[in-house]
Amino acid sequence: MQHANVWEETAVPAPAVPALESSAGAQVLVIGAGYLGLSTALHLAQAGHETIVVDAHPPGWGASGRNGGQVIPGLKYDPSELETKFGRERGERLWRFAGATADFVLDLVARHGLACSARRAPWIQGIHSAKAAERARRRVEDWQARGAAVAYLDRAQVAAIVGTDIYVGAFADYRAAAVQPLSYARELARAALTAGAQIYRDAQVLSLRAERGQWCAVTANGAGVRAPTVVIATNAYTDDLVPDLARSIVSLNSLQIATAPLPVALRGTMLSHGETLSDTRRVIRYWRLDDAGRLLMGGRGPYREAESELAWRHLVAHVRRHFPALAAVPITHRWDGRVAVHLDYLPRLHRPHPGMLVAIGCQGRGVAWQSAMGAELARLAGDPAYDPVLPITPVQPIPFHRLKAIGVASTIALWRALDRAGLS
């Protein structure tokens, strides 16, 4: 395997984005050029707000260009759970919003002509244990009672779709979709530029301070940006720019591998109608076929940066063990990216200071959730009195966050054991 991201080899060309070489001003400064920042900038520019996006890298460099391209609606919580947690009115508003996030992406693609191989694609959540099957049946009933296009699949049905019999059943969500993730990020950038936003690369923000009603950001090369409103859209790549923000999440490493294009006959034996799959294991596995017929397999990796090919060994073993027909198909690529997770698996919206907005923590559903949250952030940035779909909460650092590397490693080891025993 070469340490290379297969999406970079198949993505549409990146739009021309200059480096920030001199100081500038705008109505809104967006820090971070992933899905969230680009969607926010697009919707702000469409509403007539002068917007500047800055990032240390080109658009889509982070997790927005490294994920599996699965556009999954909903959150980790079911509608009834959200209504219990947030109250009937707020909870219903939240599940309706979350349930429509894949539709939001497809509508965005259609309205702006985004060339990113977007298509409606059922999401199959493979169920690994009897305990998880009970939860999945409740989830199906909960969503079906609210008119959602979801279903429970039995062992034979899911095996016929995914090409392996390792799952006892599946939760099938027919609202979902799939995209080429890096193409989608680059095309969002193109649409934002067309709408009038400015986007700059090589513009890592080193300091951010409030001064006479303006936020003043200073970048690594000394150039600055001033704006009365700033949106922090750095998610799993958050640093110390906002006090305690990086310590409020766990930034997990997600690994992926890709095979060479499969022979045509084999492509018809797994996810042959474009479905995407992830499972109910605590230490998740997920896979799909791309447009060239490669099998892309992903899963959690070590907390530290994965430097050795050994870090991807469990994914290779999974492919070889559960898809014996692929024994002669070489695995050609491996890459990784970061996922921002809160301990309760809920995203957050913060306003740490007047004129500063933060949305963070997509819990592995960033393609759909972050795209839709961009529109919410844009509306809130333009109208501070707007009541967004997520309640605005204070930043809460995780206790003993400095020990997270040890804690994550221990937790993942425990979760793997629970998964193997069918207790998760």
Image (spheres, rainbow, N blue to C red):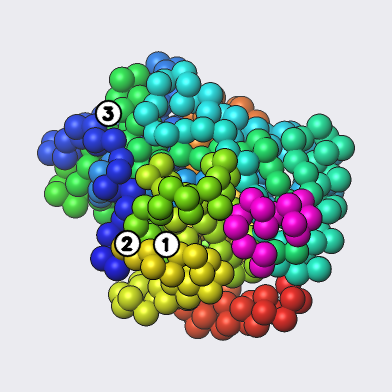
Please tell me whether mark 3 sits on a helix, a strand or a loop.
Answer: strand
Instruction: Name which of mark 1 and mark 2 comes first in the sequence.
Output: 1
| Cβ atoms under marks 1 and 3 closer than 8 Å | no
Q: Disc number at residue 198?
A: 3
Q: Amino acid at mark 1?
A: Gln
Residue segment shown in magenta: 153-166
Q: Find disc 2 in the rendering and name its residue.
A: 333
Tell me if residue 165 is in the magenta stretch.
yes
In the displayed structure, does residue 182 sit left or right of residue 378?
left
Q: Residue at x 35, y 19 (%)?
A: 195
Q: Quadrant of residue 200?
A: top left
Residue located 30% across and 43% down the image: 10
Q: Of helix, strand and loop, which one carries label 2?
A: strand
Helix, strand or loop status at disc 1:
strand
In this rendering, the answer to whether 204 lies above or below 316 is above
Q: Nearer the viewer, residue 325 or 260?
A: 325
Per the model, the C-alpha gap separating discs 1 and 2 is: 8 Å
The percent coordinates of residue 412 (x first, y second) are 57, 77
Q: Earlier in the sequence, mark 3 or mark 2?
A: 3
Question: Which callout, 1 or 2, points to the residue nearer the camera?
Answer: 2
The residue that disc 1 covers is 256
Position of residue 20 relative to residue 153, above or below, is: above
Q: Earlier in the sequence, mark 1 or mark 3?
A: 3
